[in-house]
Image: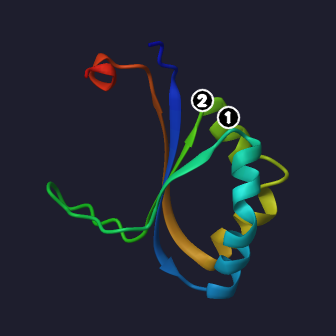
Amino acid sequence: MIRHMAAYCFFDMYEVTDPEKLEQYRSSVLATVKRYGGKYVLVGGKCDIVEGNWRPTFPVLIEFPSLEAAHSWYNSQEYAPLKALRLSGTKNNAVFLESEPSPLSSAE
């Protein structure tokens, strides 16, 4: 099986400052993610801390086919007004990660 490089956008929404803006964002963002080949892997949920001091509040993980696709989505004209809504209605940390195929991920 051939595995391709993937990229992940990890957002930790640690505070909602304007619920109405967040709801507007949520109602429209999925179409932009799909347009760039992305899919949501994780939206919220329980976090069990097993090491360190990091305390994600509301994690969101989006997978894209490449880091280039992730950045194209994030910097796109389609996403710009939604990003502005999210940034004005929430406080977040975000990181983009790229993963090359690993023998660990293909071990069965």
Nearer the observer, 45 or 8: 45
Seen at 67% across and 34% down, the residue is: 69
Q: Mark 1 points at which residue?
A: 69
Nearer the observer, 102 or 92: 102
List x then y, in percent, for residue 5.
51, 23
Looking at the picture, does residue 86 appear above or below residue 79?
A: below
List x then y, in percent, for residue 98.
48, 31
Looking at the picture, does residue 33 appear above or below residue 57?
A: above
Question: Residue 84: which disc?
Answer: none
Q: Can the viewer see residue 75?
A: no
The residues tagged by marks 2 and 1 sit, at their Cα atoms, a distance apart of 5 Å
Which quadrant is home to the C terminus? top left
Image quadrant assignment for residue 24: bottom right
Looking at the picture, does residue 32 appear above or below residue 81?
A: above
List x then y, in percent, for residue 2.
48, 13
List x then y, in percent, for residue 45.
37, 68
* Mark 1 crowd level (few <14, some 14–19, many ≥20, 10 Å Cα): some
Seen at 63% across and 86% down, the residue is: 18
Q: Can the viewer see residue 36?
A: yes
Q: Name the residue under label 2.
A: 66
Figure coloring? rainbow
Nearer the observer, 11 or 64: 64
Discs 2, 1 touching: Cβ within 8 Å:
yes
